Image (cartoon, helix red, strand yellow):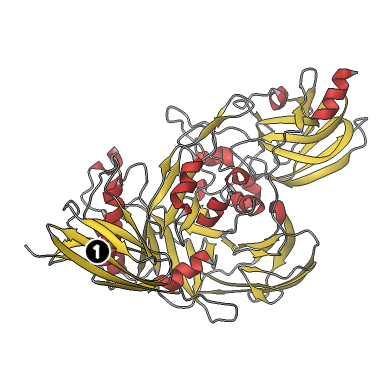
Amino acid sequence: MHYRLSREKISSFCGDVLPLYLCDNEGHALYFEDVCFRVEGNAVRLRNFREGSRVPFTGGVLVALDEVGEATVYATHAGKEYACTVSVRGMKRAVEGDTLDYYFADLHNHTSLIHNGEEFSARKEGFQDDYVAFLKNEGKINTTALTDHAETINYLDFFRGFVETERAAPMKTVIFPGAESEVRYTEIDRFGTVIRKSGEIVTFNAGDYCDSEEWETCCKMFAGEKLPVGIFAHPHVVGWSTPGVWDFDFPARSTPEMKHLICGIEVRNGLSEKKNFLHEYSYSAALDAGFRLSPVASSDSHGPCWGYGYMKPKTVLMAAEESREAFLDAFRSLRFYATESGNVRLSFTVNGMRAPATLDLTDTYTYRIECSLFREGEDLPIAGEIISDYGKTVAKLTFAEGVAEGTIRSDTARYFYLRLLDKNALRTFSPPVFTGRAADTRDFYEDLSPLSMEGAVATDLSSGKTAPAVIDGCANTSYSTGSQTPSILIDLGESHKIAAIGHLPTRVVRPTVNRKGWSEDCIAVALPAHYAVSVSEDGDTFTEVTSGVCRVFGAENIIRFAPVDARYVRFDVLDTVGANSHRKAVANANASIGNLSVFVEEKEELTKRQK
C-alpha cells in the first residue's frame, strides 16, 4: 500500500495550529503506524502524542506555526522519508478604521463520542465526523469550536477533531478543534465547607488540553501556545457536580499565563434561561481581576444537535473577512459580543473608538450606541445600562430609533461595557472599553479578623423577627426572608471599629431525590444582587458606608470599607438576582441570605484583647 503525508506543503499565518499525519491514498489517517517526525527550522513546533495514558499514537502531529519564516517537517516510516515544507507569514490583523463585518459563532459544542452515560449510550450518530458533516451541510453558522470534555476524551479523540475538520475542506463554516479543559480543584473555606474553586474552560487553537486538579498544571499546558483562545465556561453553574455554585476565584486565577489564554467568558450557556441567571455577574468580576475578555453566548450542545438553528443566543464576531485567520484575530482582539436574541447588530463607541478598545487616559467619556437587527420583524433593545468597575451601573440607557448617546465623567473608571434589554428581557452584552487604568491588585484580607457573633442579635426589619440563621456561621443554613428587599440589622452588643462585612450566599444543594417544583433557579433568583451597608452607634441614626453588587455566589463576598466605630450593622438587599434579570416570572422572588459576618482589622481586635 502507498502512504503519503496529509500535506506536502503548509503555508499559513503565525499562530495557526494544523494537523499533519500519515495517510493512505484516500486520505484516511493511519494513527498507529510507527512514524518518526522531526523538524528543521525554528518557525514551527511539533506536538506529538507518542507517550501518555490517553491512547498515545505515532501517526500524526500538530504543527504549531510560532515564528515567521521557513521550516521543513520530515516523517520517516518503514525506511521511507516524507517531507512537508512550511512557510509562515505574519498574521493579518484588523486595525482601528478598518471595515468590519458581523459573523455568527457558537464556541462550545460536544459530540456523542465523549459520553458513556445512559443518556448517550444508545446513540448511533453525533460523532466528530457527524458534527463536521452537519455544519458543512447546514452552512449557516460562520464559525464554531469543537470542545469535547477533557476528562472523557483521549489524545486520539482530540487529534481526530483536527483531522475530520481538515478532511471536510472546503466548507463555509470555520471549525476550531479544541476541548473543554477541566480543573477540578476544591478547597475548604473558613466555615469548614468544601467549595469548588474551579470549573471548565473552553480552549482551542492550541496543541493540547487540560485535565487536572490544579490550576498550575493548566497554566503550564498553554503557556507555550502562540495564540490560544480560552473561554471561562458557565462560570456560575448552580448546584451541579458539587453542592453550591462553582467559583472561579478570578483574582487567584489572574496570572500572566491565564491572561495569555483567556479571551472570553460565557454570560449565556445552553437553551435554558433558568440556568443563566448568575453567569453575567462573572463578567465584571473577571475584568476587575485584570482579565481582558469579551462576553460569549454558547449552546453547550452535547450532540447531535448543532449549528445556527440550534438556539437563538449567539456570539457575534466583528471581523475583516470570513476566514480562519480573520476569526482568530477577532477572538484574540476581543472583537465579539453576546446576544440572547441572536439578532442584535451592535456598535458601541467611546470617545470615537469602537469597543473593544483601550482609550487615552481621561476623565470624560462620550459614548454612542447604535443597534439594528440582522432579521427584521423582531425586537430591538429598548433599555439598558453602562456597567463599570465592580459591576456598578454608571449610566441608564434609553433608545430612540436604536441609538443612545451621552457622556460619563469619572477619574477612577477602568472599563465600561453594555448590558442591553429588549422588551422580552433578552440581554445583549458588549465587548469592554478599557480606560487605561490598572486593574485591582489582589486583596488577601489577611489583616481582617471576623468578630465572634456570640451575643450578637440579627433582626429582619422587614418582619420584626429575629433571624439567628443569618449569623450562625454555618454555610448550609440560610434565612429565607419574606421580602424582596429585606433589611437585616445586626446588633453586635458593643462598639467595634469594623472594616468589612462578609456575605455568604445561600448554598445550593441539589436534592438527592426528585422533589416536585425544585429547580436551580428557585434559589438562584432569590440571591441578593445589589446591596447597601450602613452602620450606627445608637441604632437610630445610620450612615451608609458602602454599596455594590454581589458577584460571587459560590464563596464569601468580603465587602471592605473605611474602618468605622459602630455597634449596629445593617445589610440592605436592594434587589435580587431575579429582579435584576427583569424577567417577570422571577422578578418578585423573596430574598434568601446564607450568612453575614462582620470583620475588624486585626490590629483593632488585638488592641481590644490587650486592654
The residue beneath circle 1 is: 74
- 534 relative to 380 in the view: left or right: right
Q: Is residue 112 above or below residue 360?
A: above
Q: Nearer the viewer, residue 536 or 183?
A: 183
Q: Residue at x 77, y 31 (%)?
A: 599
Q: Nearer the viewer, residue 377 or 62?
A: 62
The image quarter containing residue 97 is bottom right
Identify which amino acid the numbered label 1 is placed on: Tyr
Q: Residue at x 48, y 38 (%)?
A: 214
The image quarter containing residue 68 is bottom left
Q: Residue at x 28, y 57 (%)?
A: 61
- 154 relative to 92 in the view: left or right: left
Question: Residue 253, percent across and down?
Answer: 57, 45
Q: Secondary structure at mark 1?
A: strand
Q: Is residue 319 above or below residue 588?
A: below
Q: Nearer the viewer, residue 194 or 103?
A: 194
Q: Quadrant of the C terminus?
A: top right
Say if residue 270 shows up in the picture. Answer: no
Q: Is residue 553 above or below residue 293?
A: above
Question: Residue 378, percent across and down?
Answer: 52, 70
Q: Is residue 379 above or below residue 223?
A: below
Q: Residue furthest left?
A: 1
* Mark 1 crowdedness (10 Å alpha carbons): few <14, some 14-19, many ≥20: some
Question: Residue 247, percent across and down?
Answer: 56, 40
Say if residue 51 shows up in the picture. Answer: yes
